[in-house]
Amino acid sequence: MALSLSSLATAFSHLSLPSTSTSKPHSPPLLVRLPYSSRGAARLALSASAADAPEAAEPVEVEAPAEEEVVAVEDDLSGVALRKYVKQRLPGGFAAQRITATGRRKTAIARVVLQEGTGRVFINFRDAKEYLQGNPMWMEYCKVPLVTLGFDNSYDIFVKVHGGGLSGQAQAICLGVARALVKISTANKVPLRSEGLLTRDTRIVERKKAGLKKARKRPQFSKR
């Protein structure tokens, strides 16, 4: 029995040695498998980041159109949007404003309102450049009194005009702006008067006469 026990002990000892020896070579496969699992985890992480990427990009896609819309509103201030803007600047209409004046030229009548601003001109709820067809002379008429006093970038001009043509309307606006500046301060009267901006031009087209082709043009005389 002793021999058998000793033989069993030696056998178990021999069995334990290979187990320890085999555990060492088996450890590398475990180490080799870990990178595969880490690769799988990395793939999962990449897929998760790809899934989250649209969510992260959504705010950028939403913010970009918002900025474009703001620029569009500022640049395309025309039509209904411009009309609403002018009404917001003139609560109660033209008659309810504090600095108002009327200018006339030929058959054109312009009601002018001045407000502190940056020098923009609005005529009949439209931009002055659009209304006056981009004519530089007519656009200059509207701001001559402001430029004379050095207020070209200090006031916004709101105009409601009717009658006559664009040339007469522009000159009527000039007279209305000059009269409105006198209401702001009587000290503005002297420089405006010296430039002739407060004088109403009474010249109008002479009416046609009966028997004549125009106001004074007569038909050719024939003796026989």
Image: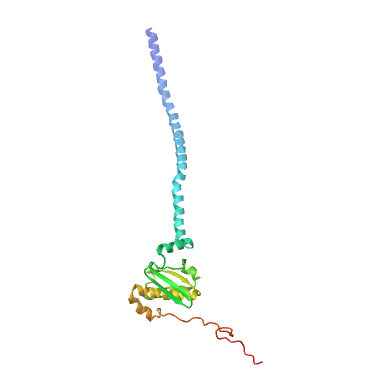
Note whether residue 54 is visible: yes
Residue lying farthest to the front in this orientation: 210
Total labels drawn: 0
- Pick the residue in front: 38 or 55: 55
Please determine whether, in this image, residue 9 is positioned above or below residue 209.
Answer: above
Whether residue 41 is situated above or below residue 114 in the rendered picture: above
Indicate whether 8 appears above or below 66. above
Q: Give the percent coordinates (x, y) of residue 19.
A: 41, 21
Q: Is residue 141 visible?
A: no
Q: Which of the image's four quarters has the C terminus?
A: bottom right
Locate residue 75, reporting x and y percent.
Answer: 46, 62
Q: Residue furthest bottom?
A: 223
Quadrant where the N terminus sits is top left
Residue found farthest to the right:
224
Would you identify the image quadrant in which residue 185 lies?
A: bottom left
- 165 lies left or right of 89: right
Name the one closer to the observer, 157 or 164. 164
The answer to which of 3 and 51 lies nearer the viewer is 51
Could you say where residue 105 lies in the image, as x and y percent from the top left?
Answer: 46, 77
Colour scheme in use: rainbow
Residue appearing at x 45%, y 50% in the figure: 62
Residue at the image position 45 percent from the left and 40 percent from the top: 48
Give the answer, above or below, for where 83 lies relative to 30. Answer: below
Q: Position of residue 196 (x, y in %)?
A: 40, 80
Residue beneath the point at 35% across and 76% down: 188
